[in-house]
Amino acid sequence: MKIGIIGGTGDIGEGLAHRLSHNHEIYIGSRDKDKACETSECMIKALSERGISARCSGVTNQEAVDLGDIVVLSINYKHLESTISSLSGFEDKIIITPVNPIGKSDHFFYDPPVEGSAALAIKRMLPESAKIVAAFNNISAQKWKNLDERLDYSVAVCGDDPSAKKIVIDLVQEVSELRAYDAGPLDVSPIIESITPLILNIAKFNNMKDVGIKFY
């Protein structure tokens, strides 16, 4: 499968690339193609030293959209609309959003747009034929790139297209020890996204690190 990652040089995007590039063709996208190429080369080398053959290329964000069957929006929420508006070609593609709109004062809080969630805002921004799926929202960014780190978490996945959601669920379960759960339609995305500020507060006020969720 071909997977384009917009914002692929960030922790989550690069971490996903590290953990999926042995099974899939990964396109690490960035506004700065040289940075994307450098990230890709470093990743290929690091995985090669572990005996893992990676298929990964550094590209522009637009090329990540053009080349990917699946496109991951690994973008900070505050840059979401400006980034999406600068790109085209999302028609008929599966779009994965791990984006969480989070505010911070003396604590973290959920700060959604008028649509109710980042995922629902993305649905408004993209063509109707794009298949939006929310996934990977509640995993610490610091955990992704450390390949010695076991990702033993639950991942809630929601979306309106059943076939796209099934593809994403299968993809999630290729990563370390993640377990994916079908959480329902995209309307559930505000609940999923709002879990992230909750676990950040739990970590902050209880002197914990990299808190996640697991369903039993």
Image: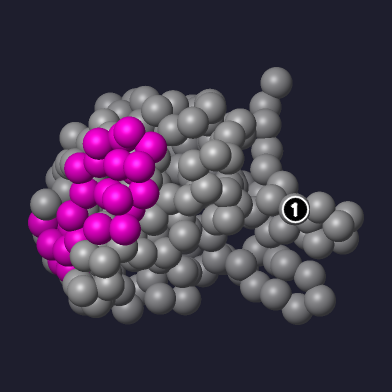
Report which quarter residue 9 is drawn in.
bottom left
Question: Is residue 125 in view?
Answer: no
* Quarter occupied by the N terminus: top left
- Magenta-colored stretch includes residue 18: no
**Relative height, residue 45 to residue 205 (above, below):** above
Which residue was labeled with disc 1? 209
Q: Position of residue 90 (x, y in %)?
A: 17, 56
**Type of amino acid at the residue the image marks with label 1:** Lys
Q: Is residue 32 left or right of residue 169?
A: left
Q: Judge whether residue 57 is colored magenta.
A: yes
Estimate the x, y position of residue 14 in percent, counting from the top left.
38, 55
Residues drawn in magenta: 41-66
Q: Residues within 10 Å of mark 1 (few under 14, many from 20)?
A: few
Using the image as rendered, state which of residue 55 and residue 173 is in the foreground. Answer: 55
Q: Residue at x 61, y 67 (%)?
A: 102
- SS under mark 1: loop
